[in-house]
Image (cartoon, rainbow, N blue to C red):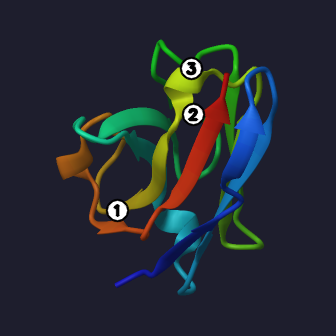
């Protein structure tokens, strides 16, 4: 099993930026597709972004397209989520997740095998 640890969350004003990081244990990180999800209080966990094992393919939720960028550094076993032009509605706990043994990324939480504990992002208006 892979262990995932998120960092980089915090409090930011609307219009500001944050970069989340997710560090993975293990030597097979480059075989994993990676995703970022978020969950606001009282809401279901929702897809934010995903990146294929090589970094050559990315996918974004419509709500974050043009504002968020997912990237990975396989040499550092780390995936990033750069979040710009943040809005109060982006406030949530952000989770990274790993998916393996399949061809492509997924927008469904059930499609991921391992999850981090999450990091809180709060955007004030």
Q: Secondary structure at mark 2?
A: loop
Pick the residue in front: 39 or 57: 39
Pick the residue in front: 84 or 80: 84
The residue located at (53%, 87%) in the rendering is 26
Vertical order, 24 against 74 (above or below) = below
Q: Which residue is mark 1?
A: 100
The residue located at (45%, 81%) in the rendering is 3
User: Residue 42: x percent and y percent?
Assistant: 23, 38
User: Residue 89: x percent and y percent?
Assistant: 50, 23
Q: Tell me where residue 98 sits by quadrant.
A: bottom left
The residue located at (34%, 62%) in the rendering is 100
Q: Which residue is mark 3?
A: 64
Badge 3 crowding class, 10 Å Cα cut-off, few under 14, some 14 to 19, many 20 or more, is some
Q: Tell me where residue 37 sits by quadrant.
A: top left
In the picture provided, is 47 more to the left or to the right than 70?
A: left
For discs 3 and 2, the disc positioned in front in the rendered view: 3
The residue located at (42%, 42%) in the rendering is 38
Query: Residue 28: in sight, yes or no?
Result: yes
Q: Tell me where residue 79 sits by quadrant.
A: bottom right
User: Which label sits on residue 57?
Assistant: 2
Q: Secondary structure at mark 3?
A: loop
Earlier residue among tags 1 and 2: 2
User: Residue 20: x percent and y percent?
Assistant: 68, 53
């Amino acid at each position: 099993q892979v262990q995932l640890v998120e960092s980089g969350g915090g409090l930011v004003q609307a219009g500001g930026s944050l970069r989340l990081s997710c560090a993975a244990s293990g030597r097979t990180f480059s075989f994993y597709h990676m995703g970022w999800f978020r969950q606001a209080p009282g809401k279901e966990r929702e897809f934010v972004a995903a990146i294929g094992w090589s970094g050559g393919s990315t996918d974004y939720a419509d709500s974050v397209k043009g504002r968020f960028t997912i990237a990975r550094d396989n040499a550092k076993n780390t995936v990033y989520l750069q979040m710009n032009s943040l809005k109060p509605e982006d406030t949530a706990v952000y989770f990274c997740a790993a998916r393996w043994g399949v061809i492509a990324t997924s927008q469904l939480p059930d499609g991921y095998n391992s999850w981090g504990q999450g990091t809180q992002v709060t955007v004030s208006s």
